[in-house]
């Protein structure tokens, strides 16, 4: 079986360092917001090339607290994509605001900047582009629209740590960048974790307070916050893994280009396309195929862990039924959800495994064409 993601090989690479640092934390008696939390924040801000970073419990909390820090709430609208993980719009719902969906670009699967302006109303407060699969959304265009209409921008970078546009890291274009350290992400903790990035001291300090029960000074509470501190064991583990991120991202890219090469003569398969000037970090390697559901089933039955991210667009999910979304609202999003399929992708996948994936895919396409 070739899984969509195999974390065991990465653990072998870093096992000695991780186990040493975890034991040190356990012996230290300092389990919440110790030296590792602080150091990770500084290292993360430096890596992204921004002023501040604040470590949190999850990527979902990063989005939620970013919205809180920008005072977005009931009665406000936030324009985003329906072609993403539910956490993006869940965060909008948690603060009482309303997600407004704009369609995606058919090449990148990301929010199409041409679709944004027609969705703006007097209630619009922010735009949340998602850098899906590790491919940057068109931030220069999105920032242009945001500036023109005086809107905040929160970047959902949960799948895109280290991705760049013209040498600038994602998470530093908008007002706040949101990252996830869920174990399957490109920089994964051994549990949940998240981070926000910003160039604003005021926003960073507000999120520091919000993550800690609305408190900047112990036992003095300014507003309703949450408990969302990244714990010290996870921060320590992430600091061991962080120095490898460029190497791991580069290997993902190498593997993606190998897939491109192996697939170049396979009819009917659409490989990922990169926007000019962008550095994609291939959180997923996602192709488009005909007869997608049957092809995926064939792959699963023949030892290839192909996955669908995501099978149902958010405007058609039960959770957002109250928004009145219906089939036909977002034609590109709807078409892509029936065609996309992600292939096994991780830094350590071997060339032999990739060849097996592609050979099995070729078989699957043939078999499904014949109606097997
Ligand atoms: C993973 C993910 C999130 C949520 O991150 P968690 O750390 O799991 O809460 C949000 N948005 C996108 C696009 C994601 O992939």
Image: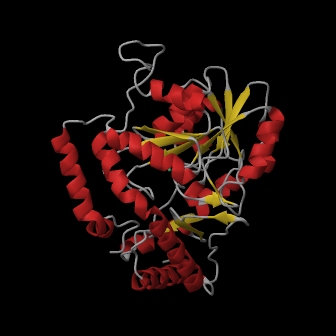
Residue 81: % across, % down: 65, 45
- In the rendered image, which quarter is residue 240 located in? bottom left
- Up the image or down, 62 lies above or below 23; here it is above
Q: Which of 97/368 is in front?
A: 97
Q: Which of 144/208 is in front?
A: 208
Q: Is residue 193 left or right of residue 321?
A: left
Q: Residue furthest left?
A: 27
- In the rendered image, which quarter is residue 326 located in? top right
Q: Is residue 6 left or right of residue 44?
A: left
Residue 370: % across, % down: 54, 81
- Up the image or down, 297 lies above or below 32; here it is below
- Up the image or down, 326 lies above or below 340; here it is above
- In the rendered image, which quarter is residue 324 located in? top right
Q: Is residue 315 visible?
A: yes
Residue at point 44%, 74% (across, down): 298
Looking at the picture, the colour scheme in use is: secondary structure
- Up the image or down, 345 lies above or below 95; here it is below
Residue at point 50%, 60% (across, down): 308
Q: Is residue 94 visible?
A: no
Q: Is residue 98 left or right of residue 231?
A: right
Residue 106: % across, % down: 71, 60
Residue at point 59%, 71% (across, down): 289
Residue at point 54%, 65% (across, down): 282
Q: How many marks?
A: 0
Q: Which quarter of the rendering shows the N terminus?
A: bottom left
Residue 364: % across, % down: 49, 79
């Amino acid at each position: 079986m070739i899984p969509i993601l195999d974390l065991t090989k990465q653990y072998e690479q870093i096992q000695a360092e991780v186990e040493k640092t975890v034991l040190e934390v356990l012996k230290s008696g300092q389990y919440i917001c110790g030296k590792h939390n602080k150091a990770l924040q500084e290292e993360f801000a430096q890596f992204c090339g921004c002023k501040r970073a604040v470590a949190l419990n999850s990527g979902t909390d990063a989005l939620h607290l970013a919205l809180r820090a920008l005072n977005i709430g009931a009665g406000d609208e936030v324009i985003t994509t329906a072609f993403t993980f539910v956490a993006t719009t869940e965060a909008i719902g948690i603060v009482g605001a309303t997600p407004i969906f704009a369609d995606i670009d058919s090449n990148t699967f990301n929010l199409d900047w041409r679709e944004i302006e027609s969705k703006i109303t007097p209630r619009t407060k922010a735009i949340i582009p998602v850098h899906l699969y590790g491919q940057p959304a068109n931030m220069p265009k999105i920032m242009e629209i945001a500036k023109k209409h005086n809107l905040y921008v929160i970047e959902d970078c949960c799948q895109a740590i280290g991705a760049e546009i013209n040498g600038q890291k994602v998470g530093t274009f908008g007002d706040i960048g949101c990252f996830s350290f869920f174990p399957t992400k490109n920089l994964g903790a051994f549990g949940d974790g998240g981070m926000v990035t910003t160039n604003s001291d005021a926003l960073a300090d507000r999120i520091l307070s919000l993550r800690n029960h609305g408190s900047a000074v112990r036992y003095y509470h300014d507003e309703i916050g949450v408990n969302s501190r990244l714990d010290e064991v996870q921060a320590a583990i992430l600091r061991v893994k962080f120095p490898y991120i460029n190497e791991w991202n580069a290997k993902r890219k190498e593997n993606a280009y190998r897939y491109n090469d192996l697939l170049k003569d396979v009819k009917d398969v659409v490989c990922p396309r990169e926007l000019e000037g962008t550095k994609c970090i291939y959180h997923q390697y996602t192709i488009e195929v005909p007869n997608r559901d049957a092809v995926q089933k064939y792959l699963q039955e023949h030892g290839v862990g192909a996955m669908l991210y995501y099978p149902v667009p958010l405007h058609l999910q039960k959770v957002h039924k109250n928004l009145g979304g219906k089939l036909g609202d977002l034609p590109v999003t709807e078409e892509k959800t029936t065609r996309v399929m992600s292939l096994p992708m991780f830094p350590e996948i071997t060339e032999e495994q990739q060849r097996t994936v592609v050979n099995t895919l070729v078989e699957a396409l043939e078999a499904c064409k014949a109606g097997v």
